[in-house]
Image: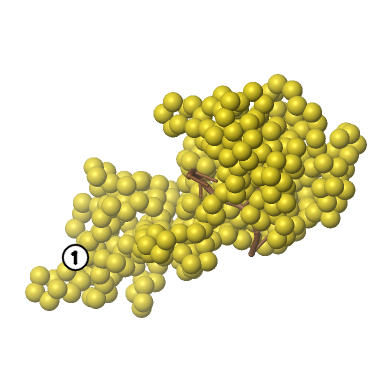
Amino acid sequence: FSSQKRQLNPALKRNCLCEECPFFNWTQVPFARVPDLNSPPPPPPPFNGPSTISNNCSSPVESGSIEDSKTNLIVNYLPQNMTQEELKSLFGSIGEIESCKLVRDKITGQSLGYGFVNYVDPKDAEKAINTLNGLRLQTKTIKVSYARPSSASIRDANLYVSGLPKTMTQKELEQLFSQYGRIITSRILVDQVTGVSRGVGFIRFDRRVEAEEAIKGLNCQKPPGATEPITVKFANNPSQKTSQALLSQLYQSPNRRYPGPLAQQAQRFRLDNLLNMAYGVKSRFSPMAIDGVTSLAGINIPGHAGTGWCIFVYNLAPDADESILWQMFGPFGAVTNVKVIRDFNTNKCKGFGFVTMTNYDEAAVAIASLNGYRLGDRVLQVSFKTNKTHKA
DNA sequence: TTATATT
């Protein structure tokens, strides 16, 4: 398309097959940059690959982008354990959010790995794409793009392709299928050890009718230069599982679906950790800045850090048990051990207990957050364990 | 036949 159209319709650059477009072949774009959330977004990385296929970008009218929302984003490839609050916190750092939803399995409550963020201001939506698309969180590289208008016609448009020549590249795969419609995503599965193609892949079209046409045109056909025909069929719907798998998933899924008020601070810290793990730097969500009051300065050097950081919890009720300690400290990070100290004769809690956490940062934020926390009618005292004797 | 792309 012309440069004039490109300026008028920035949405058209996303998921585009046109090789001059920086979003061509999104999955192959390297994401080496470290975004600075406090600075204006850098320009999107250019695509430097060879240019051999023709420009087949849709016109604005054909793509329907004139009516597309400029504020609503779809976020794909989210880490499995990322919560809706974390999603909102991350994207809220760009601008005011009108609504935010993490899509979950209706039955198990498990995240499906994608969500929607709707901004108030289209400028913020564009900024979020430029700033957060390609952000690496844990093992994932998230993708941020404009959401297409919700429609039944764009569902079930994912194809499974097998029997591909082992030498076929992702670009060649897209080239083969692009004659049937607009490709949203493509992927060729590779052997994890050797990195060589397994001859199977996925193609997601914009519309189901395009996928149907591709099946008609390409199933049992030989790609140019290939010796064997390929198989093209609709991909399995990932949500169809056995009841046993569902039960197993339910059993493994922690109680994260309906976070209580206490969890919010922990979630902000978890998001900070996600970013720290990705970049090794402190973000604006740094624990030093949580609510602007819980400074970590002045905390005594804790007793020892042999197997973790031991935390002293005081003013527990006589009927307190280990589970309450897990519940309180677990959201802040890795907890390896909890213990409620009980009277030998009555077996009632003597009013204190210990929690061991693996990581100093997480322990420090847990202490800063939970010290003074009201549990029932008691106000807890929480600190790193010291060697001195506590006077009851 | 992936990790999970339309609320």
* Quarter of the figure that contains the N terminus of chain A: top right
Indicate the amino acid at tag 1: Ile
The residue sitting at the left extreme is A345
Please say which color scheme the image uses. by chain
Q: Quadrant of the C terminus of chain A?
A: bottom left
- Viewer can see residue A147: no
- Image location (x, y in percent) of residue A107: 48, 67
At 81% from the left and 48% from the top, the residue drawn is A63
Residue occupying the far bottom of the picture = A377
Q: Residue at x 36, y 78 (%)?
A: A377
In-front residue for pair A73/A366: A73
Image x and y of residue A328, in percent: 37, 63
In the image shown, does A111 or A339 lie closer to the viewer?
A111
The relative height of residue A25 versus residue A384 in the rendered view (above or below) is above
Vertical placement of residue A174 versus A118, above or below: above
Question: What colour denotes chain B?
Answer: brown
Q: From the viewer's perspective, is A132 left or right of A342?
A: right
Name the colour assigned to chain A in the rendering: yellow
Q: Secondary structure at mark 1?
A: strand
Q: Chain of mark 1?
A: A
Residue at x-position 58% and y-position 53%: A114
Camera-nearest residue between A185 and A127: A185
Front residue of A196/A102: it is A196
Query: Dot 1 surroundings within 10 Å: few (below 14), some, or many (20 or more)?
Result: some
Question: Residue A172, position in %: x, y?
Answer: 66, 29
Residue at 39% of width from left, 52% of height from top?
A333
Give the percent coordinates (x, y) of residue A181.
Answer: 75, 43
Residue that label 1 marks: A341
User: Is residue A163 in view?
Assistant: yes
Q: Residue furthest toward the right? A: A4
